[in-house]
Amino acid sequence: MNEIVRKTQPTVTHASLDPQDWNEFRALAHRMLDETIDSIANVRARPVWQPIPEDVRATFRTDVPRGPSGLADVYREFSESIAPYATGNVHPGFMGWVHGGGTAVGMLAEMLAAGLNANLGGRDHMPIEVERQIVDWMRRLFEFPEGASGIFVTGTSMANLMAVLVARTSALGALARQYGIGNDGALLTAYTSQAAHGCISRAMDIAGLGSDALRKIRVDADHRIDVAALRAQIAIDREVGFKPFLVTASAGTVDIGAIDDLKSLAQLCREEGIWFHVDGAFGALAILSPELAPLLGGIELADSIALDFHKWGQVPYDAGFLLVRDGEQHRQAFAQPAAYLRREARGLAAGAVWPCDLGPDLSRGFRALKTWFTLKTFGTERLGTVIARSCALAKYLETRVLAEPRLELLAPVNLNIVCFRYRAADEINREIVADIQESGIAAPSSTMLDGTFAIRAAIVNHRTDEGDIDALVSAVLEFGARRGGDGLIEVEAPPLAAQ
Ligand SMILES: *Cc1c(COP(=O)(O)O)cnc(C)c1O
């Protein structure tokens, strides 16, 4: 018998990083879990955000920790100096930028994933099947064909960059990966709207095509790309010898949540033989809501879609995703043979195509698990309801703004984003936003619309309700009166903060 005999060898020193006393560790771990659950359950008791005190910041300017510290001490430092000064997007009063609120379920899944410590670059193990399951769910939701492929990435910035790279390889052929983009590559031009996210321009830059090769087409009054102007620009570019290769549509612009006319764009791209990519960072998941899904009509015709589960999907950061209609083209843009990554027919090295064939990362974490837990535990219908409700709350805020003479609505409310102002100078509105953030009552952000400063509230968090909207409106009026009323400017955060 070829019995494998395990030899027990005397240990030289205790080199393992496992706890010496598992019971003590377990007790502390349970406390951490309890306190984390409490902090999520009682999130309303805290300010949305608070400025980091300088002495706290200073404690994070220390030398390399060469010796050990007790886990309890390190945890205390986390509890006292890190947790209270986070962004605040768990809080229902957070309405800045586009931030997801996360869920307690997602938090648990992150813990379970960390326990497995899976590497999802490749090989044959069940965590990769979980990722493939979600790829298939997304394929079904967006009505992509069987051969579609997809991959988890950090966020939509990365997914948009990868879409540019797939479209580039598709336009130039796979040899461009070896020879570089060459003269043909220098002629490639891409198109998006003036309202598109800045990461699209950056993707062109990083891809080596140059941000100047991205044409930013004007938008209509609703911030949707002007399709006629796009068609005209493509014709002009072809005329002078450029090679239009990519149109990136926005499904939910970051300023006002506008959704481009995806059907017309799909048709235009098909006629022109141009890759049609959709930046659906937050908006694409509106597909989960039967009442909102029609707004995305045409997304099923895209060549690729970028989206974030960490925004409207409420999955904890980070969980971006890229879906590509033609899985083979996706693979051709990234796959690379390497002896140490040889695929086998059986054993742990089986199971190709591996995720590392579909993106720039080799080692990858288990982002799929928190997404799988979120989709399974809540179900897509309930998540769709949450998404629809944040749009209803945006409508409620719109109503409040329209009913209040001291406020002015600055853009149509398409989805979940409301841009408005206190009727006073831009400078005052800028101060109002900072005042509200520092008060801890709410955290709106800002944007510029047609040269006017806008207070911007994006309702993404599933915990947000009418009361939070009312608190935001009251805070804008209160701080506006203080800032604008008689020029009386208080430096201290006013007593409104208690809530
Ligand atoms: C958030 C966002 C992005 C960037 O996504 P990240 O996940 O932050 O990288 C791109 N486009 C739009 C429309 C967005 O809202």
Image (cartoon, rainbow, N blue to C red):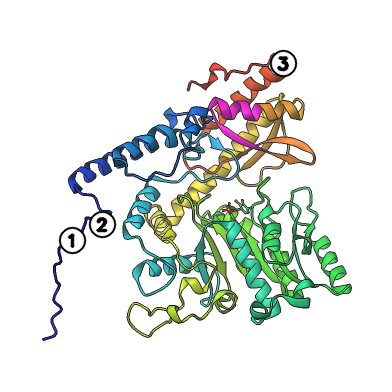
Going by the numbered disc 3, the residue's amino acid type is Gly
Q: Is mark 3 within 8 Å of ligand 1?
A: no
Q: CA distance from mark 3 to mark 1?
A: 75 Å
Residue 499 horizontal/vertical position (percent): 48, 23
Question: Where 353 falls versus 379 (above or below)?
Answer: below
Q: Is residue 329 magenta?
A: no
The residue under label 1 is which amino acid type? Thr
Q: Which residues are magenta?
A: 432-446
Q: Secondary structure at mark 1?
A: loop
* Residue at mark 2: 15
Check contact, mark 2 vs mark 3: CB within 8 A: no
Q: In the structure shown, which secondary structural element does the residue marked by tag 3 occupy? A: loop
Q: Does 318 sit left or right of 233 as displayed?
A: left
Q: Which residue is mark 3?
A: 485
Q: Amino acid at mark 2?
A: Ala
Residue 6, picture quadrant: bottom left
Image point 76% across, 53% down: which residue? Answer: 194
**What is the CA distance from the residue labelled 2 to the residue labelled 3?**
67 Å
Q: Label 1 to label 2, Cα distance in Å?
A: 8 Å
Task: Sort mark 2 into few (<14), some (14-19) or many (20+) by Cα contacts within 10 Å.
Answer: few
Q: Quadrant of the N terminus?
A: bottom left
Give yes or no for contact between labels 1 and 2 (Cβ–Cβ under 8 Å): yes
Helix, strand or loop for disc 2 = loop
